[in-house]
């Protein structure tokens, strides 16, 4: 009960930062109003492979994770609770399902701040996609290094508070591991080592890959972690300390592309990893991957932003030839 009270204090005291940077108007725009979200859900969710967040999904989550259900109902009893949460007191999950779907709708349309702010009012059902939207915003739109690092740290802290409510929920585990991986990338070697994140993050991604071998995001993230280690200390020391080698990084991305070759994020992460390993050695491979990436169709703001990163890199590296 004490842990629930602490979480309630955390949620009730949330304040939202100044306006976030908008999704670029020059990139493709997306409309997932009404039934279009459910219609396109399988394609939109090719990465994480989540079930559609309807009433059945929410009821299953509540049954599987009693602490999550307890916390959500405690939030629903707060005098300022969102109406979608209050409906739970009458065992009505439809409003919360609709509101959770709206969080995802806002995310896929590129309205990341609105997705985050709505999701944070909906208990864990909304907080998980809200944090994902915050992570993608930090990764794909924020350019200032200090702001990016601070945003990833905020998201990691929020994820750490929520994960005990659903300790083996893969998407929440991935979100925390993703935040930690991005933090590591932004720190120098000594600061990155001091966080203690690397071993745990690698273990988390390896565990997710073992549990869900058909999900491409997990080997892609693991490959990026291996590449980051090799960039800092080389394959020999990397293998001894963290089991990371150049060949393991390449094998992880090869597996990711075998599983999913239509997501710009896989190409984006692969190219970044090759640049860390040896930009000169892998220059031609990077160009080929980027050329493939920019030809991919995109169905969401997240995908469009990843494809644009590929386009920017292609222009940069082709211009350097």
Image: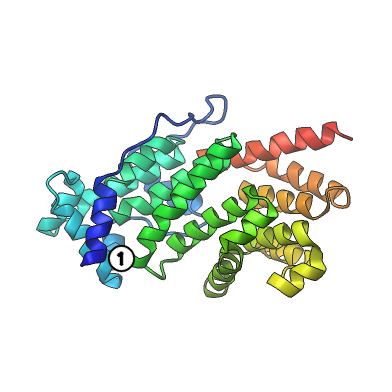
Q: Nearer the viewer, residue 78 or 94?
A: 78
Residue at 20%, 54% in the rendered image: 75
- Describe the element under mark 1 as helix, strand or loop: helix
Q: Which of the 4 image quadrants contains residue 192?
A: bottom right
Residue at 35%, 37% in the rendered image: 16
Relative horizontal placement of residue 113, taking residue 98 as reference (left or right): right
Tell how many labels: 1
Q: Position of residue 45 (x, y in %)?
A: 48, 53
Q: Position of residue 276 (x, y in %)?
A: 76, 52
Question: Is any atom of residue 198 visible in this view?
Answer: yes
Looking at the rendered image, the quarter that the N terminus falls into is bottom left
Looking at the rendered image, the quarter that the C terminus falls into is top right
Residue at 76%, 62% in the rendered image: 250
Q: Nearer the viewer, residue 60 or 42?
A: 60
Residue 63 position (above or below residue 78): below
Residue at 64%, 36% in the rendered image: 308
Query: Where does label 1 land, which residue?
Result: 61
């Amino acid at each position: 009960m004490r842990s629930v009270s602490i979480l309630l204090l955390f949620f009730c005291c949330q304040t939202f930062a100044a306006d976030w940077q908008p999704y670029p108007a020059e990139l493709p725009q997306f409309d997932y109003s009404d039934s279009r979200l459910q219609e396109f859900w399988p394609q939109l969710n090719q990465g994480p492979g989540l079930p559609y967040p309807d009433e059945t999904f929410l009821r299953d989550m509540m049954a599987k994770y009693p602490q999550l259900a307890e916390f959500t109902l405690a939030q629903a009893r707060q005098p300022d609770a969102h109406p979608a949460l209050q409906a739970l007191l009458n065992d009505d999950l439809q409003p919360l399902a609709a509101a959770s779907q709206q969080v995802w709708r806002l995310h896929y349309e590129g309205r990341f701040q609105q997705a985050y702010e709505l999701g944070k009012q909906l208990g864990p059902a909304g907080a998980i996609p809200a944090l994902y939207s915050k992570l993608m915003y930090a990764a794909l739109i924020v350019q200032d290094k200090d702001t990016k690092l601070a945003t990833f740290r905020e998201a990691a802290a929020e994820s750490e508070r929520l994960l005990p409510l659903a300790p083996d929920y893969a998407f929440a585990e991935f979100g925390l591991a993703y935040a930690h991986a991005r933090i590591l990338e932004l720190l120098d070697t000594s600061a990155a080592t001091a966080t203690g994140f690397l071993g745990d993050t690698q273990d988390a991604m390896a565990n997710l890959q073992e549990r869900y071998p058909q999900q491409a995001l997990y080997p892609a993230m693991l490959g990026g972690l291996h590449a980051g280690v090799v960039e800092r200390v080389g394959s020999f020391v990397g293998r001894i300390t963290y089991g990371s080698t150049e060949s393991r990084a390449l094998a992880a991305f090869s597996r990711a592309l075998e599983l999913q070759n239509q997501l710009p994020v896989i190409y984006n992460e692969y190219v970044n990893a090759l640049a860390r390993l040896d930009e000169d050695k892998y220059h031609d491979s990077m160009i080929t991957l980027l050329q493939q990436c920019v030809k991919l169709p995109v169905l969401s703001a997240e995908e469009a932003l990843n494809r644009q990163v590929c386009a920017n890199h292609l222009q940069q590296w082709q211009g350097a030839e």
